[in-house]
Image (cartoon, rainbow, N blue to C red):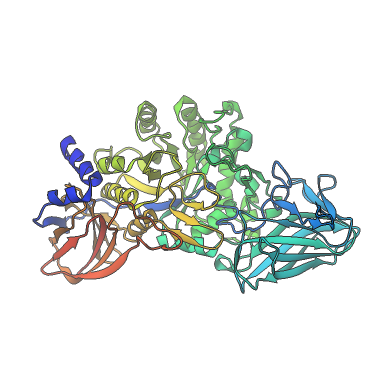
Amino acid sequence: MTARKRFLNLLLFVLAPAALAAQAPSNPVVIRVDAAHPGAAIAPNMFGIFFEDINFAADGGLYPELVKNRSFEFTDPLTGWHEVMDVTARGIATPKGELDVRTDDPESKVNPHYLRARANTPGYGFYNGGFRGMGIEAGNEYRLSAYVRTGGPKTLRAELTDEKGKVFGSGKLEGFGDGWKHYETVIRATATEPKARLAFYLDEKGAVDLDFVSLFPVDTWKGRPNGLRKDLVQLLYDLHPGVLRFPGGCIVEGRELANRYRWKSTVGDIAERKTILNRWNLEFESRPTPDYFQSFGLGFYEYFQLAEDIGAKPLPILNCGMACQFNSSETARLEDLKEYIQDAEDLIEFANGDVSTPWGKLRAEMGHPAPFGLDRMGIGNEQWGPRYVERYKAFAEVLRAKHPEIKLVAAAGPSPDGELFDDLWAQWRQLKPDFVDEHYYMSPEWFLENTHRYDNYDRSGPKVFAGEYAAQTKGTTRPDNANNWKGALAEAAFMSGLERNGDVVQMSSYAPLMAHVDAWQWKPDEIWFDNLHSFGTPNYYVQLLYANNTGTRLVPATPRLEDGLYTSAVLDERTHEWIVKAINTTAKARKAEIRIDGAKAGATAKVITLKSATLEAENSFEHPQAVAPVTGTAAVRDGVIATELGAYSVNVYRVSEQ
């Protein structure tokens, strides 16, 4: 496509609808699908998802623990915990006891802090406010548990309350002794409250020691104890993603190496997983979150299990011996890389090893004797430069020799072009990783202009993983970015280019995946949630349309790009259907004829349409499907579908072979 034509496409996208209407062509556009000549195979896991613990996506989100700072390991160990004040006759608020965080003779040496609550007067109370409140639903049950030790009171009374103290659920932990022991009970809620609290009361004088205090919904995904939040997993399941990239992202790197993600600290007994600072804690001055830590209740075992549940290939990303180059840029010496490489080898054993191996045995003890089927792994997240290449080579030398079955993913740096990007690609063409992970957080106009990006990539070199991308409607990392239809429509057009080049682009994932509406650091995001509800954005539904309508082979289709129209076509050999996608980015509906040439098509096509009358449209809690797919049918006569491509629309046609 010429530079002039690309400019006209952008102009169509950004000008006012009235001006666009005058320019729109009146004759039908003819989309020809060469069904007789299917092309290269498409990777079955091309359209996937990327999860990172940003925007409170894990603790308090996908991992639905309701108690914040349950092990008292935050920098301020009483973060999230507050005393219930008693108002005296003089109007002075004072507690009936005291809270004291200690480390002597702890329950856990990994997380050594614990709470000593002392009642000087019976009725002393304290509470936890959760992650911007606790989402509690009427009729649901919540498992309350804690490790407790005491030489005094034998009972701890618990209440679910609203912010004013109204009680709508209660229970007791009781029968304590003088040594650490785990206690639990189940509380049934009698009301729905999005900002609930969990309050405790000592009705006897004396002190109790508490650690790993947890309030967890009984009704989790697949009913698992310590399981995941059902509505959020359902949104992921509905995507039918081909791959799940985890756990990040920049948290893989850490601000310093001491704060990097260590997968071995995230498996085994959840009470023994070391809590650390989340690297997004103070990253953005406009959105400080000093209470953002990682408990790792959602750890590598849970990630593998989630990938299996939603039918996605697991793609773990491991630290390569480098901290975030935008922060400290701390780098491990080459002679010290043995520990990092051993972590990679041990992870393969944890995921795939026989139960007789040490890490395979741990996987089995956690509840999954069968292997997880790991076949790919990322070395580093978003690194660049000679230091990174040296460290990748050290990993690759060992893993290629010992585990040739594992495909390796190398990074292309933080930008989609430029000197650093070009230098890395030159190295990767020589070193031949299986995939190169490209990231682009760019404007909607950039996505439209780059639908042709992969048309001329080297087919014999490493494959591409479009590992992080999202249209930034106002500017990269700006807090006023929107999840609007303008960004999503541009992403849909760009994805037509990914699909047309499915022989070289073999994995992709939008980023970030999730955000808590009261605790986010980054916009836009694919899914938004609060303590009780969630919804998919227009960007989510674009991803859903592509991931739910993948094919097995590319099919030539013309035109690919024409005056704000973007097309792609694939063959699904599993269902014997041709799938045609047509994206109209103009403000004028366009008549079109889709011709299935060289094959006999059935009489009816399934049609899925995603559109909005305005580019500014967004979904919300009040209107979660303001922009959402609508399904219908269209007649197919002699292999031709006479149709209309609505203004600002994404259209999917599934045509069966006769």
Q: Residue furthest left?
A: 27
Q: Nearer the viewer, residue 331 or 585?
A: 585
> In the rendered view, does 428 fall on the left or right side of 16?
right
* Residue at 66% in and 53% down: 68
- Residue 642, relative to residue 287: is it above or below? below
Residue 353 spot, x, y in % from top left: 57, 52
Q: Is residue 400 above or below residue 559?
A: above
Task: Report the residue at 35% width, 62% height from top.
Answer: 628
Give the image location of residue 339, x and y in percent: 62, 36
The quadrant of the picture occupied by the C terminus is bottom left
**x, y (%) of residue 23?**
13, 48
Viewer-nearest residue: 55 or 309:
55
Question: Which residue is drawn at the image coordinates 67% and 46% (left, top)?
Answer: 275
Residue extending farthest to the front is 90
Q: How many marks?
A: 0
Q: Could you tell whether 433 is left or right of 571 in the image?
A: right
Residue 424 location, x and y as percent?
39, 30
Q: Is residue 65 left or right of residue 597?
A: right
Left or right, 654 with respect to 345, comes to left
**Quadrant assignment, res 135:** bottom right
Quadrant including the N terminus: top left
101 or 146, nearer to the observer = 101
Residue 36 visible: no
Res. 636 image quadrant: bottom left
Between residues 138 and 50, which one lies in front from this camera angle?
138
**What residue sits 59% from the left and 55% below the top?**
60
Residue 522 visible at all: yes
